[in-house]
Image (cartoon, rainbow, N blue to C red):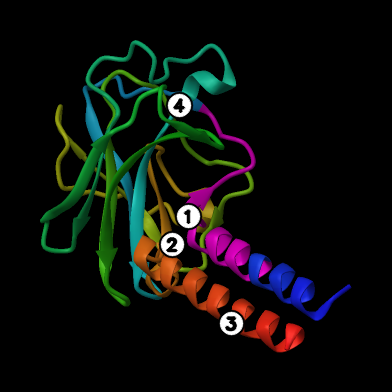
Amino acid sequence: MSQFRKFLLVALAVLAIAHVAAAGSIPAVSFTSPGPGTNFTSGAFSMGYQFTTNTAINVTALGFYDAALTGGLQGLSGCDGCGKVGIYNSSGTLLVSGLATTSGTLVGDFYYVSVPTTSLAAGQHYFVVAESGNADYTFATVGFAVNPNITFLQDAYVSSSTLAFPTMSEGFTQADGGGFFGANFEESPATSATPEPSSILLLGSSLLVAAGAIKRKILS
């Protein structure tokens, strides 16, 4: 294989790796299987959980748990007053929100809706909550796992028919399966944020210039 061809293969690999690394948003929490499914009989709630950020992150999507995926329960499809998800800071300011539907992206037990990239600072306290409406929720999940970029604190909720800042908690932690679901989000580390198209173009142009120089050297 010629030196020029080897260089082109390496260049293509570099571009491919850059593209894959840029695309990696992952859920904040997940579980291998849901726990018991039930519904609030006393009205609608905004419910989710509290967390702190271990590093600066970019929130890219918001998710809602769909109980219908486990069969026989009321999920997102046809539910009344459910699906809106939001992230609040510790002062109660809504930073970003979106409406999850079954036409969104399904990852695990959650349907996600893309939202404008929202940066969360490292070492801060946040809440992610969702309107429950009449949708069933799960608790005491099995195989509950937390993204290493955050620390799961405990469940959070408030009685409300619309999306609202949570002021209550049952004290359910990661060891308890995470509490009520509910809400979730996808994120990527801020240091691994998606490069702008201009940055990728510049990288590609630089590789092409280098390839041309190597080819001229080989042919001279």
Spatial CA span between label 1 and label 4? 20 Å
- Mark 1 neighbour class, 10 Å CA radius: few under 14, some 14 to 19, many 20 or more: some
List x then y, in percent, for residue 164: 14, 41
Spatial CA span between label 3 and label 2? 31 Å
Relative placement, left or right, of 103 versus 157 is right
Q: Quadrant of the N terminus?
A: bottom right
- Marks 1 and 2, the one that precedes in the sequence: 1
> Which of 213 and 105 lies nearest the eye of the viewer?
213
For the residues labelled 1 and 2, say whether their Cβ atoms are less than 8 Å apart. yes
For the residue marked with disc 4, what is the amino acid? Asp
- According to the image, label 4 marks what residue? 66
| Residue 215 is inside the magenta segment | no
- According to the image, label 2 marks what residue? 188
- Mark 2 neighbour class, 10 Å CA radius: few under 14, some 14 to 19, many 20 or more: many
For the residue marked with disc 1, what is the amino acid? Ser
- Marks 3 and 4, the one that precedes in the sequence: 4
Judging from the image, what secondary structure is the residue with disc 4 in? Answer: loop
- Mark 4 neighbour class, 10 Å CA radius: few under 14, some 14 to 19, many 20 or more: many
Does residue 6 sit above or below 38 in this rendering? below
Write the residue at 46% across / 68% down: 149
Residue 147 in view here: yes
- According to the image, label 3 marks what residue? 210
Judging from the image, what secondary structure is the residue with disc 3 in? Answer: helix
Does residue 181 sit above or below 101 in this rendering? below
Q: Which residues are magenta?
A: 13-36
Of marks 3 and 2, the one in the foreground: 3
